[in-house]
């Protein structure tokens, strides 16, 4: 029962972790640029982290639908007619 829950939740968790990882790298790079420009680490971190939180859009991250258009209907194969086999009703001979 729980395996179905984990199976459906894992893609969303993976997308979330990937998003947060990319966001953390961007924020870290921005903080490093600010420090290189002479700003203090604490002030830069406070400003950049709050900007990253404001940039977070959960609807973009957790949308589960993907694909495009309407699903194609599968064509059914016509049923094969069975050959009627006539049996000898009187035994072997």
Image: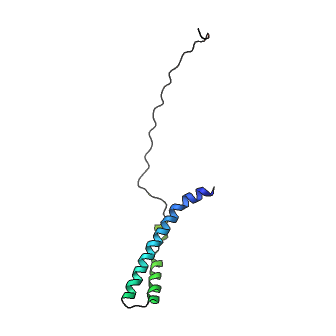
Residue visible at 43% across and 79% down in the picture = 27
Depth check, front residue: 91 or 73:
91
Location of the N terminus by quadrant is bottom right
Q: Residue 33, how many percent across, how many down?
A: 37, 84
Q: Residue 2, how many percent across, how many down?
A: 62, 58
Can you say whether 6 is above or below 72 in the image?
A: below
Q: Is residue 59 visible?
A: no
Location of the C terminus by quadrant is top right
Residue visible at 52% across and 65% down in the picture = 13
Q: Residue 72, how many percent across, how many down?
A: 43, 46
- Identify the image quadrant of residue 28: bottom left
- Identify the image quadrant of residue 77: top left
Q: Residue 19, how many percent across, how many down?
A: 46, 70
Can you say whether 79 is above or below 60 in the image?
A: above
Q: Is residue 72 visible?
A: yes
Depth check, front residue: 60 or 46:
46
Coloration mode: rainbow
Q: How many marks?
A: 0
Residue extending furthest toward the right: 1
Residue visible at 43% across and 87% down in the picture = 44
Residue visible at 59% across and 56% down in the picture = 4
Residue extending furthest toward the left: 37
């Amino acid at each position: 029962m729980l395996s179905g829950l984990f199976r459906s939740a894992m893609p969303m968790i993976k997308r979330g972790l990937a998003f947060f990882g990319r966001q953390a790298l961007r924020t870290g790079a921005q903080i490093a640029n600010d420090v290189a420009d002479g700003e203090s680490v604490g002030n830069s971190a406070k400003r950049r982290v709050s900007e990253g939180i404001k940039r977070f859009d959960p609807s973009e991250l957790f949308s589960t639908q993907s694909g495009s258009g309407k699903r194609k209907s599968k064509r059914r194969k016509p049923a094969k007619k069975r050959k009627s086999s006539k049996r000898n009703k009187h035994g072997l001979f």
